[in-house]
């Protein structure tokens, strides 16, 4: 099936549950992104800052770009002028740098705190207690150019639905607790970014509001030779 056909089928499925689709376009050429755009997709997720910065000027300016991969502090300045949402904030230090660069660009940048939920050491993210510690800190309170709009998590790379369900459930439970404690009156704290091509249906069942889907739309990535 074509990118257009894949996308329309997916959108039809997601529209019934009111979940935002982030089309993960990492390693995909500009023409593939353009095809998805022409089919109505407006939110795209990239993993690498350099790749994102190269693609962004070549594509329509109403695209909402999301940075979903691990972000190094020294790369924030390159995306600060245009990024819509950073999913992968995993430290106060990174948040402070995003705040600094957002201020330079006279804007407020929306961010999600990435929470470590997987049973794998290779994943990034804050521990549950670290999320609470960060939100309680005076250093966080001083940041006026970032806005925390929710949480993000990457589940274990497993085909065990029970484990996936538990990991997503834990993130949703943390989200509910944090909303109650820190963002009760903030209508913008509403996003739970969880679920990818292999596990998005389970993630949606557990309360995801954003799914990050690449291969289901664009096909598998070419194998490195």
Image (tube, rainbow, N blue to C red):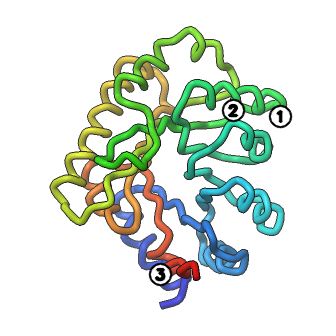
Q: Residue at x 42, y 73 (%)?
A: 10
CA neighbours of label 2 inside 10 A, class few (<14), some (14 to 19), many (20+): many
Instruction: Point out the tag, 1 or 3, that comes first from the N-terminus.
Output: 3
The residue sitting at the left extreme is: 162
205 displayed left or right of 208: left
CA neighbours of label 1 inside 10 A, class few (<14), some (14 to 19), many (20+): some
Asked which quadrant contains residue 75, the reply is top right
Q: Residue at x 61, y 61 (%)?
A: 44
Asked which quadrant contains residue 92, the reply is top right
Q: CA distance from mark 1 to mark 3?
A: 37 Å
Q: Is residue 87 above or below residue 195?
A: above
Q: Is residue 104 above or below residue 35?
A: above
Q: Which residue is mark 1?
A: 105
Q: Is residue 159 above or below residue 30?
A: above
Q: Secondary structure at mark 2?
A: helix
- Badge nearest the viewer, 3 or 2: 2
The residue sitting at the front extreme is: 225
Q: Secondary structure at mark 3?
A: helix
Residue 66 in percent (x, y) is at 61, 52
Q: Which residue is mark 3?
A: 6
Q: CA distance from mark 3 to mark 2?
A: 34 Å
Q: Which residue is mark 2?
A: 98
Instruction: Point out the tag, 1 or 2, that comes first from the N-terminus.
Output: 2
């Amino acid at each position: 099936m074509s990118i257009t056909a894949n996308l329309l089928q997916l959108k039809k499925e997601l529209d019934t549950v009111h979940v935002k689709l982030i089309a993960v376009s990492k390693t995909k050429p500009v023409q593939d992104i353009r095809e998805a755009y022409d089919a109505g997709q407006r939110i795209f997720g990239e993993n690498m800052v350099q790749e994102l910065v190269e693609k962004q000027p070549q594509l329509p300016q109403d695209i909402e770009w999301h940075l979903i991969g691990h972000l190094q502090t020294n790369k924030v300045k390159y995306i600060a002028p245009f990024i819509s949402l950073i999913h992968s904030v995993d430290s106060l230090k990174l948040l402070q740098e995003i705040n600094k660069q957002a201020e330079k660009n006279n804007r407020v940048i929306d961010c999600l705190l990435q929470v470590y939920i997987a049973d794998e050491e290779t994943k990034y993210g804050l521990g549950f207690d670290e999320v609470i510690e960060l939100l309680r800190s005076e250093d966080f309170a001083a940041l006026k150019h970032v806005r925390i709009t929710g949480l993000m998590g990457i589940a274990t790379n497993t085909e065990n639905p029970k484990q996936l369900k538990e990991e997503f459930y834990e993130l949703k439970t943390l989200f509910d607790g944090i909303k109650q404690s820190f963002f009760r009156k903030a209508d913008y704290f509403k996003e739970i970014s969880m679920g990818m091509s292999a596990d998005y249906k389970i993630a949606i069942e557990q309360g995801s509001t954003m799914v990050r889907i690449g291969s289901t739309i664009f096909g598998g990535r070419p194998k490195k030779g």
